[in-house]
Amino acid sequence: MVALLVAMAVTAVWMGAALPAWRQQVQREKEAELIFRGEAIARAIYLYRQKNGQSLPPNLDTLVNQRFLRRKYLDPITGKDFLPVAGATAAGGSTFGGGGLQGGIIGVRSTSNETSIRIYNNQQTYSQWAFDFTLEQQRAGGGAVFMPSGDGRGGGGGRQGGGRGTGGGGRGGRGATDGPFEPITPPGARGGRGGV
């Protein structure tokens, strides 16, 4: 009987020590899944734009229906839908073209304000992890994107410079502005290098 009580006590101590490590491992797996799903959505928006004259998709269902996205993913942190981020892009792919601005979604965010274990694009709060098509666009290079200002989140900095000429210097983002739209760039983007 004494041996059984000792065994139960040792097991309880061992489980108490293992539980935080197990919880952390589960959280890391959720974070990895969040990145996978968020980047899949960002890539789908980028591919949609490539096929549809740089216009933005109106919603995630469009990406699923047109087979740019396998399915409508849920946010693994909250178990609910992702928060779509609305924005606008210049019609015809021009920066300030005469065609005006076309609206749609530029990406998604988590609705969780919890602190993450992992740091993603210099952010440690899930709701600030940016899953925008601009990540893919940055790899391909180019294109101005506009986001409604006054949402309190602040811009991502100055616009990225082009491949030729002098690149733009990055400036710090800010919250609300007087204009209807505020240019944004991918997280971590800096001013481009001067070309030949």
Image (spheres, grey):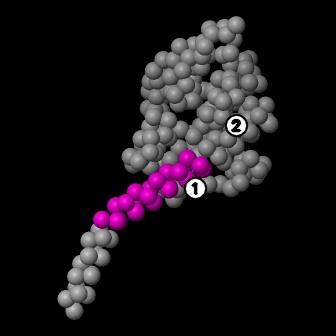
Q: Which residue is mark 1?
A: 74
Image quadrant for the N terminus? bottom left
Q: Residues within 10 Å of mark 2 (few under 14, many from 20)?
A: many
Q: Can see residue 101?
A: no
Give the prevailing secondary structure in the magenta stretch. helix
Where is residue 58 drawn, in percent x and y? Answer: 68, 42
Q: Which residue is mark 2?
A: 46
Question: What is the span of residues highlighted in magenta in the rendered image?
Answer: 17-37
45 vs 120, nearest the viewer: 120
Where is residue 140 drawn, in percent x and y? Answer: 70, 28
Residue occupying image coordinates x 55% and y 53%: 33
Does residue 8 belong to the magenta stretch?
A: no
The tag earlier along the polypeptide, 1 or 2, is: 2
Vertical order, 10 against 46 (above or below): below
Image quadrant for the C terminus? top right
Vertical order, 9 against 174 (above or below): below
Q: Element at badge 2?
A: helix
Q: Amino acid at mark 2?
A: Tyr
19 vs 183, nearest the viewer: 19
Contact, CB < 8 Å: mark 1 with mark 2?
no
Residue occupying image coordinates x 56% and y 17%: 191
Image mark for residue 139: none
